[in-house]
Amino acid sequence: MKYRYSVVVAFVLMLIASDAFALDAYKDRRGMFVGLGVGGGVGSVPDQPGEVTGVADGEMGLATQLTVGNGIWKILTMGGQFNWWVRTVDVNEQSLSHHHLNFLATASFFPLDFLYATGGFGMGYAIYDSSVAGIEVKKYRELGIAAKVGAGIEFWVNGQVATGVEAAYTRHFYSGSDFDTFTGALVVKWY
């Protein structure tokens, strides 16, 4: 009976103890990671002649991001990132929707353990509305390229989870117009 309790206690301790202390990868960015970010930021689409987008002067919108990648070294991570900025505005009693997405190849460099610079380049896609003379809503769908630069801080919560904040500037280059965002997000990464 005493033997069973010892086995149960040992088993429970192994389950609740952080196995990261025993691994070489404790608080290490090398290997696969997944990151999620939620925040907001200012986005703007310039108005075309005779049209109003509702966000030409910059409007706050919801900004999200999903990153899947691999840590190359302790100071360098690379991966793919999906970003989405969304906002609906009312202009002339019309509801104008804005969705700007991008799929980027990104890299993050950590000169200090908690501070990083990030950048990416890839494909941008826009789904947005414009009010034509306050009478009709014109819908745009554009595919282009996108580029992103930013910086952030990241602190370890435990051996495999890090959280922090990131500020970024993203530029979408479309054939009909361009789109800019300045965003800030709370980011959580699982290494």
Image (spheres, rainbow, N blue to C red):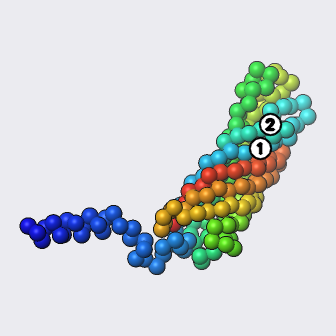
Residue 114 placement (x, y as % from top left)? 63, 67
Q: Measuring 35% from the left and 67% from the top, which residue is drawn there? A: 17
In which quadrant will I find the N terminus? bottom left
Left or right of 164? Residue 61 is right
Q: Is residue 151 visible?
A: yes
Secondary structure of residue under mark 1: strand
Q: State which tag comes first along the sequence, 2 or 1.
A: 1
Q: Measuring 73% from the left and 55% from the top, which residue is drawn there? A: 168
Left or right of 87? Residue 23 is left
- Confirm or deny contact between disc 2 and disc 1 (CB under 8 A): yes
* Residue annotated with mark 2: 55
- Using a 10 Å C-alpha cutoff, classify the residue at mark 2 as few (fewer than 14 neighbours), some (14 to 19) or many (20 or more): many
The residue type indicated by label 2 comes to Val
Q: Tell me if residue 70 comes above or below residue 68 in the rendering.
A: below
Q: Nearer the viewer, residue 46 or 176?
A: 46
Q: Tell me if residue 1 comes above or below residue 101 in the rendering.
A: below
The residue type indicated by label 1 comes to Gly
Residue 109 placement (x, y as % from top left)? 68, 71
Q: Is residue 82 visible?
A: no
Q: Tell me if residue 28 comes above or below residue 124 in the rendering.
A: below
Label total for image: 2
Residue 73 placement (x, y as % from top left)? 60, 77
Secondary structure of residue under mark 2: loop
Q: Measuring 43% from the left and 77% from the top, which residue is drawn there? A: 23
- Using a 10 Å C-alpha cutoff, classify the residue at mark 1 as few (fewer than 14 neighbours), some (14 to 19) or many (20 or more): many
Residue 48 placement (x, y as % from top left)? 88, 37
Q: Nearer the viewer, residue 168 or 79?
A: 168
Q: Measuring 24% from the left and 69% from the top, which residue is drawn there? A: 10
The residues bearing labels 2 and 1 have C-alpha atoms spaced at a distance of: 7 Å
* Residue annotated with mark 1: 43
